[in-house]
Amino acid sequence: MPLAVPLSPAGRPARLFSACTSALLVAGLAAASPAAAADSVSYDFESPSQKLPFMAINGFGRVLVGPAPGGRSGQAARVNIPNDGRSFKSELVIKGLDAGSHRFTFANYLPGDWQERDLDTIVAQWFSTQDDGGGIKPVVALSVHGAYWQLKVHWMTNGEIQETVIPLGAARPGHWNRWAFDITWSSAGKPGSIAVTRDGVTVGSHQGANNYHRGEPPHFRIGAYRPNWRPEKGPSKRVGASEAVLFLDDIAITSTTPGSRPDVRATAPGGAASPSESPAPSPSPSPTGSPSTSSSDRPGEALAGGGTAHGAMAQEARTDATVHGSAGRIGVVGGALGGAAALAGGAFFLLRRRTAKGSTRRAHRRTRT
């Protein structure tokens, strides 16, 4: 409600002051209720009422929410693919993202009895559905192969799919990994970039083309996928293999600006150099990474107990959303507040001048009479 002020004979200063006060209140409400950032979503699996993303399951795999393992408090998603001759994929699918820049953060956990196999188990992938609907490799895929993490990046040259493999360090069964992927998608005339951190340490990066530049923008899939278990590839890859079981938690996607990076510690020894914030166009994408064990693979470098900071990933995403998504809004709101305050101050000054002039004229009339 506008503040009450004396009316001048014409009433204009009071109306001006009232309008400026209303503008100030509106600006204050805008500051108290910022708009949600676009292209942002998170899942922490703690609320029974939280609606989960679409599940892509081939065969008899499952994605179930239950107690988190490894000393981590709260809930997590348990993903499994049974070795039954039919099942090969159990994933959560998040679509609707644009072809710009995003930060993807999540935590995953390989159980202590994880079986090392000389085959890929993809645990996160970015997939671009093509116009012809045909099967095609994911543009980016994080997988565990044998005893190591690796990242595969695909792009197309003259109609042929190209691939680069970036080693990301040793996998550690029985350990919660905190991942962050900063991805700017390339276009036909502009290079993209990928920066990967695990447990706060840079472990790999890629500059250049990172998708096929056709079809829909890449969407995000997370869970477990064993391409070599597809039924058409025969039973030989399944012989002696146990079912795939892993856990997921604190999935968050946030829109960012090109070149933005998470807060990270120094690059792990022998790891990737930080990518340039303004990559020059390059016909040949340049990956960097390290096959050696990163500093985060040593005891004491990760979060104590793997779970004493449950929700750390979601907190990182919330902090990042505040930094990258709210800065512009804060500037706009600040400008609105400042402008409204200036108008209100001007109206009050004008009101005082008119009031003073009216008092002077009344004094002169009393003197003449």
Image (cartoon, helix red, strand yellow):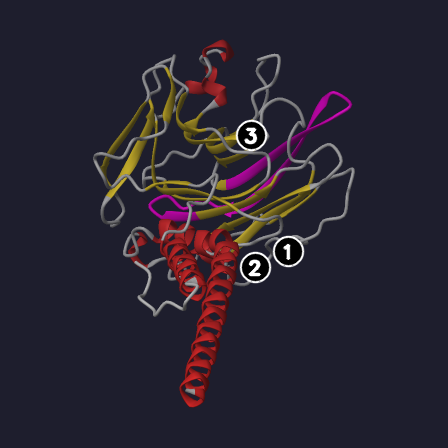
Tell me, for residue 273, which label it has, or none: 1
Q: Which residue is depicted at the point 73% across and 22% down?
A: 160
For the residue pair 356 and 289, the one nearer the viewer reads as 356
- Amino acid found under the numbered disc labelled 1: Ala
- The residue furthest front is 369
- The residue furthest bottom is 367
Question: Magenta segment range?
Answer: 149-178
Q: Name the residue under label 3.
A: 218
Residue 361 location, x and y as percent? 46, 81
Relative vertical location of residue 202 with respect to residue 58 in this rendering, above or below: below
Location of residue 155 by image quarter: top right
Residue 211 location, x and y as percent? 64, 31
Residue 221 location, x and y as percent? 45, 30
Query: Considering the numbered disc 2 on the image, is that residue within a helix, a strand or a loop?
Result: loop
Mark 1 to mark 3 CA distance (whole Å): 25 Å
Location of residue 16 by image quarter: bottom left
Q: Mark 2 points at which residue?
A: 267
Magenta stretch encompasses residue 167: yes
Which quadrant, please, contains the C terminus?
A: bottom left
Q: Which mark's residue is nearer the viewer, 2 or 3?
A: 3
